[in-house]
Image (cartoon, grey):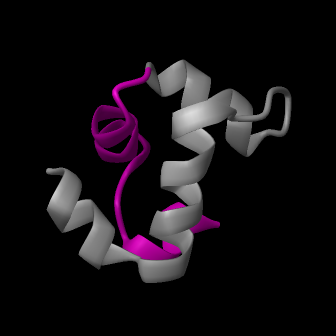
Amino acid sequence: MIRNKTHVSQAVLAHILNIQTTTLQKWEMEINKPSGTAARLLQLIDKKGKEVIQLVR
């Protein structure tokens, strides 16, 4: 899970992605899937970790 790799809370990651915490929770529970810009940003965070988070903040 991306949050475990980057050591950020749901609230922090939701803020970085500019989404509601409930949306992130649904993604994590695989109820919904991210798409578009959010999906791409999550791929970058997964690949580069905190480097991307620091850039986005």
- Residue positioned 71% across, 28% down in the render: 26
Is 13 magenta? The answer is yes
Left or right? Give the position of 47 relative to 11. Answer: right
Left or right? Give the position of 21 relative to 11. Answer: right
Is 43 magenta? The answer is no
Left or right? Give the position of 29 relative to 36. Answer: right
Q: Quadrant of residue 25?
A: top right
- Residue positioned 27% across, 62% down in the render: 53
Where's residue 6, x and y in %?
A: 40, 73
Q: Nearer the viewer, residue 35 or 18?
A: 35
- Residue positioned 21% across, 52% down in the render: 56
Q: How many marks?
A: 0
Residue bounds of the magenta highlight? 1-19
- Residue positioned 62% across, 44% down in the render: 39
Where's residue 17, x and y in %?
A: 38, 37
Q: Quadrant of residue 42?
A: bottom right
- What secondary structure characterizes most of the magenta part? helix
Q: Nearer the viewer, residue 43 or 32?
A: 43
Figure check: 17 above or below 40:
above
Q: Nearer the viewer, residue 49 or 7?
A: 49
Figure check: 19 above or below 34:
above
Figure check: 13 above or below 22:
below
Where's residue 34, x and y in %?
A: 68, 35
Where's residue 33, x and y in %?
A: 78, 34
